[in-house]
Amino acid sequence: MKTTIDDAGRATTHPNLILGICCLSLLMVAMDATIVNVALPSIRQDLGASISGLQWVIDAYTMVVASLLMLAGSMADRFGRRRVFQTGMALFMLGSLLCSVAPSVHGLVVFRIVQALGATMLNPVAMSIIANTFHEPKARARAIGIWGAVAGVSMALGPVIGGALTETIGWRSIFWVNLPVGAAAMVLAARYIPESKAPHPRRVDPIGQLLVFVILATVTYAVIEGPHARWSSSVIVGLFATAALALVALLVYEPRRHEPLIDVRFFRSAPFSSATLIAVCSFSAFSGFLFLNALYLQEVRGLSAFHTGLCTLPLALATILCSPFSGRLVGTYGTRPSLLVSGTATILSALMMTQLTAATPLPFLLLSYVLFGIGFGMVNAPITNTAVSGMPKAQAGLAAAVASTSRQIGASLGVALAGTILGTHMHKGFAEASHPFWWLVTGGGVTVLLLAWLSNTGWARDTTRHAAHLLEEAPTGATA
């Protein structure tokens, strides 16, 4: 076994093996998302689920992940990254096992929450392990590149494997895939990943954490259940009011914290705020696309789960090819070219989807999928780069965590909006009922174009320097 010497002079396992172990968790979690989407029609038929029930199968997971990502990072820094990683893996495997035996859609939603609790401790903590394993900038960049490639491959494999399993064995088998992968990762982590902690871990912010969860939970519930409970009902109005009050409380409380969960000074940087909004728009579009696409191809066009996965493959391959290209483009020319391509491709794809009917020619449909994959593939590198560029080095990890959280918020919001819009207009037929969502995605693409220009102006760069100056003035330990 090859070894290397860490900063403390201790011999450790070869970094590439640690990278491989961490990538196992990414493979499992990333593939799980697309596998579940392909299986939604089968879950609906078997468990008698409504559209809102299917929305909760997806959003119960993404909402919990979005709420707890930053908390998981703090726990790993405080209690040990390997320990938290293994705990997360055990929870994810338990949740997967429970999902495979869920007796009802309500039980499946509860068990997806168990999965999500584990997922919050996997990818962010795995990335932290990688960052603390690869100290050379070039080696770290290469490791992150491999990490991104694994994410792309996972997304490509998910629909195909999920479709094949759903069609041959049944939808419950999609959760069994996680068990051998998770078991291998746990054993290898115990054997080869050295334990590490932050010298000065951030303090836990329970009030800030609670407020973030309240905001996400109330908004998601109100959007999903609004069509059924009536938008003007006291319950829905009360939920939106609660979300607004929690947001105000968060904005008032967090600046007074010595070590806040979310440092609102980040948002004084126009590029950082732009990256956050772009992440929400892009991942809303992507998650809504996956949700609607699986239902459309199987319930409207009558395709099998396996053929649905094959139809989604062009999108995944376009994303895989464009993601590393976008990273190189950002490194050479900045974020504007990648964002312009992303926004343009997303707009073109969404405009094509506004013409969707039950008999849309398959080549036309697949072309729209490729364009959507290009748009999504080009956007990830600019989001991360814009979020951390110009920030103090000590703050880069927290800035990246906020960007990751905004991705999950977008994913949760996208499914909620897609299902709600579909349910509201279902009397027109499935394909026509989805048109308002595609117009919404078109607006998101336009927003990406506008922010691509705004975030690269001289004024925007000045706001980043000002925000960085404020963050550097923070008391010692505030950003540990």
Image: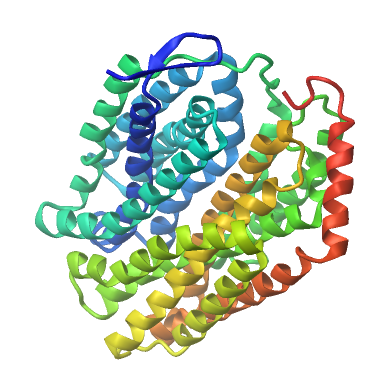
Q: Position of residue 316 (x, y in %)?
A: 35, 64
**Picture residue at 30% right of the left edge, 31% below the top:** 93
Could you say which is closer to the camera, residue 337 or residue 183? 337
**Residue 278: where, in percent of width, then height?**
64, 62
Image quadrant where one finds the N terminus: top left
Q: Nearer the viewer, residue 139 or 470?
A: 139
431 w.r.t. 200: above or below: below
Q: Measuring from the top left, give residue 431's x and y in whole percent.
A: 39, 83
Residue 261 visible in image: no
The image quadrant of residue 303 is bottom left
Q: Residue at x 22, y 39 (%)?
A: 101
- Position above or below: 84 against 358: above
Colouring used for the render: rainbow
Q: Nearer the viewer, residue 153 or 214?
A: 153
Residue for point 66% across, 61% down: 334
- Quarter location, residue 304: bottom left
In the shown orientation, is residue 338 left or right of residue 27?
right
| In this rendering, position of residue 444 left or right of residue 315 | right
Q: Quadrant of the C terminus?
A: top right
Query: Residue 453 placed where, x, y %?
Result: 74, 71
Vertical relation: 103 (above or below) 338: above
Asked if residue 454 shows in the view, the reply is yes
Residue 62 sits above or below residue 134 on the image: below
| Residue pictured at 87% horizontal, 30% vertical | 256
Q: Quadrant of residue 294?
A: bottom left
